Amino acid sequence: MSFVKDVILDVDTGIDDALALILATRLTHALRIVGVTTVAGNVDLASATENTRSVLGLVERADVPVAAGADGPLARPLRTAPAFHGDGGLGDVDSSDWNVPRPPLLDEPAPSFIARLAREHPGQITIVATGPLTNLARALTEDATLARNLAGLVVMGGAIGVPGNASPVAEANFFTDPEAARIVLSADLPTILVPLDATEQVRIQRVDVERVRARAPSRRSPVADFALEICEFYLRACESHGREGAALHDPLAVAIAAIPELAETEPLAVQISTLDPLTAGQCVVDRRPRTPLRPELPPNVHSCTRVLADTSRQLILGEIFPR
Ligand code: RIB
Ligand code: CA
């Protein structure tokens, strides 16, 4: 019997979040999207929300409820990432003129939506978070039962044994809202961490984009054309920052939520620094052996280490650009 996981996707829809949304709607054998919540991160909240609704409309999933959340981090100013995602979050694409039925925006704020669905479906819902963890931190703070009502969390975030991408030591989602990341990783919630250590192994290359671009237009769909446009923007941005190819951060988190066997994990005791400016957002890992005299923090995440990179890449690109 196949096990389909009920998920809420918590996104700051920029380019790789958009790819992750497309992928999640394709993995119907493994994921059932019961809601999407939006948070400010790559772009402001309004753009993240409109982008999310547009992408869901484009993939004909106007049935998925969308709830908007935090317009900024818990305790510091918002820092967006236009260099990588464009001013609007979808590269050069303006989705405002798309003639597609889009999901309505719920009046209910994202933290309340998350907590309510978890109460209504105890132990069934997994959060897949691909943006700053502000919404989930607020939900955990507002509802003390949330951690035990959720089945688990898959979070794209952090840098364990590799450099950061937002600072020398911090990954962007944790850098944007370190206070939220600290709250979430301190909750008693089964957590799979998908850090840069894993996501940097799974990249889209220029040759991938050229291969899709070479297909006859009749063999491409509006979704593939959109994905092609934003991937080309993302690739140019990453290449201009000296990177070879572009890491598929958020799509990999969705793929691992669907197929955990794509990654090996190790239990880690991770704490998040909130100390500015040097280490805010850094994952501080305690690898010291625990002794009776030092009952330090027990492991609080299963952090992805080795990934089946080719398999993951082929899965992600094959679902986003089906032949
Ligand atoms: O560090 C990569 C993460 O930060 C991705 O989720 C990307 O979308 C940005 O939010
Ligand atoms: Ca993201």
Image (cartoon, rainbow, N blue to C red):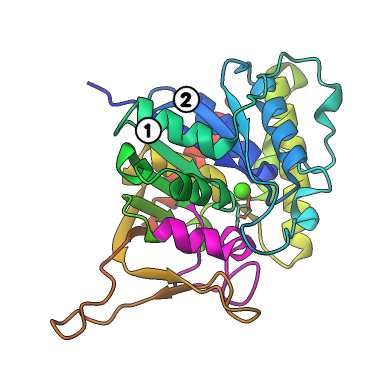
Q: 127 or 251, which is in the foreground?
A: 127
> Quarter of the image holding residue 219?
top right
Q: Do the residues bearing badges 1 and 2 touch, measured as CB atoms within 8 Å? A: yes
SS label for mark 2: strand
Residue at left offset 30%, top offset 78%: 287
**249 relative position to 82: left or right:** left
* Quadrant location, the N terminus: top left
* Quadrant location, the C terminus: top right
Which label was assigned to residue 67? none
- List x then y, in percent, for residue 50: 74, 32
- Outermost residue on the bottom side: it is 293
Q: Residues within 10 Å of mark 1 (few under 14, many from 20)?
A: many
Q: Which residues are magenta?
A: 156-185
**268 relative position to 209: left or right:** left
Q: Which residue type does callout 2 highlight? A: Val
Q: Which residue type does callout 1 highlight? A: Ile
Q: Residues within 10 Å of mark 2 (few under 14, many from 20)?
A: some
Residue at left offset 64%, top offset 61%: 176
Q: 40 or 17, which is in the foreground?
A: 40
Alpha carbon of mark 1 to alpha carbon of mark 2: how far?
A: 8 Å
> Quarter of the image holding residue 167?
bottom right
Q: Point out the tag, 1 or 2, that comes first from the N-terminus.
A: 2
- List x then y, in percent, for residue 266: 29, 62
Q: Is residue 128 magenta?
A: no
- List x then y, in percent, for residue 294: 21, 83
Residue at left offset 55%, top offset 47%: 130
Residue 323 seen in the current view: no
**282 relative position to 223: left or right:** left
Residue at the disc numbered 1: 125
Q: 242 or 293, which is in the foreground?
A: 293
Residue at the disc numbered 2: 34
- List x then y, in percent, for residue 91: 80, 43
